[in-house]
């Protein structure tokens, strides 16, 4: 099991990494502004699921596997970068509408938000770098058992990301009235698009 120092170090490192602006949080803010808190939390659910995926990969030796299947991971990297560019294109040319507070959100929109969150995280170079490069510096993964992963790392990851994401969602919802104009929404979404393109470029340059 992890000691208190490792728990605090991991939680702090993950919280800081999550709070640093990136494609995930940019999409979270944009979705929360346009669709409200429920839509934002659905996207956050997808983001957290993506983080848990990479956490599991790191704990169970993805870095070791990557050394033997480099060509496959190069393909995955290009696919992720292209997907981020596709999302950026959608955000840049999004058809904005006036924000209606209290408008019921369709189930399809919530599912789409969750899937977007998952795919954005899986293609986010910041997330990949954290779990596959920084995490081993914080925690000795060779000592992490299945019990430690399931009873400590997974709940810690969910709590930290939920806390950070909730702050972004609440803040975005509180300023919705300031972004009710179509021009303001366009600037917000295009800003998110620029961040996604930058993330895709960073992934390919590495």
Image (cartoon, grey):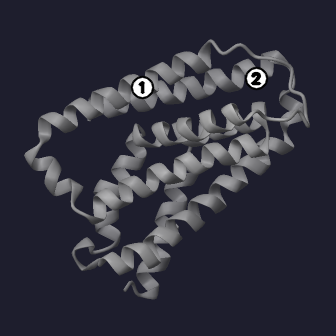
Q: Residue at x 33, y 33 (%)?
A: 203
Residue 91 image position (x, y, % from top left): 60, 21
- For the C terminus, the image quarter is top left
Q: Nearer the viewer, residue 132 or 150?
A: 150
Q: Is residue 6 above or below residue 107?
A: below
Q: Nearer the viewer, residue 134 or 118?
A: 118
Q: Is residue 6 above or below residue 38?
A: below
Q: Residue at x 72, y 18 (%)?
A: 186
- Drawn side of residue 131 relative to residue 33, left or right: left
Callout 1: few (<14), some (14-19), or many (20+) C-alpha neighbours within 10 Å?
some
Residue 86 image position (x, y, % from top left): 47, 19
Camera-near label (1 vs 2) is 1
On residue 25, the disc is none
Count of number-bearing discs: 2
Q: Residue at x 44, y 84 (%)?
A: 5
- Judging by the rendered image, the residue that carries numbered circle 1 is 83
- Judging by the rendered image, the residue that carries numbered circle 2 is 185
- Drawn side of residue 158 relative to residue 98, left or right: left
Residue 205 image position (x, y, % from top left): 28, 30
**Residue sticking out furthest to the left:** 68
**Residue sticking out furthest to the front:** 107
Q: Residue 145: which quarter of the image?
A: bottom left
- Drawn side of residue 175 relative to residue 186, left or right: right
Helix, strand or loop at mark 1: helix
Callout 2: few (<14), some (14-19), or many (20+) C-alpha neighbours within 10 Å?
many
Q: Residue 106: which quarter of the image?
A: top right
């Amino acid at each position: 099991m992890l000691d208190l120092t490792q728990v605090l170090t991991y939680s702090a490192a993950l919280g800081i990494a999550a709070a640093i602006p990136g494609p995930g949080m940019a999409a979270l803010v944009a979705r929360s502004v346009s669709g409200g808190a429920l839509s934002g939390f659905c996207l956050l659910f997808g983001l957290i699921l993506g983080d848990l995926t990479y956490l599991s990969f790191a704990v169970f030796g993805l870095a070791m596997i990557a050394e033997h299947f480099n060509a496959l991971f190069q393909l995955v990297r290009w696919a992720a970068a292209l997907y981020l560019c596709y999302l950026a294109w959608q955000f840049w040319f999004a058809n904005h509408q006036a924000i209606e507070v209290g408008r019921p959100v369709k189930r399809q929109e919530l599912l789409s938000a969750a899937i977007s969150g998952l795919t954005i995280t899986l293609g986010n170079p910041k997330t990949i770098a954290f779990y596959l490069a920084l995490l081993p510096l914080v925690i000795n993964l060779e000592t992490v058992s299945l019990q430690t992963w399931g009873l400590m790392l997974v709940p810690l990851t969910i709590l930290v990301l939920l806390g950070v994401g909730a702050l972004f969602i609440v803040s975005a919802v509180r300023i919705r009235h300031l972004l009710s104009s179509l021009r303001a929404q366009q600037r917000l979404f295009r800003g998110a698009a620029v961040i996604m393109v930058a993330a895709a470029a960073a992934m390919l340059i590495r």
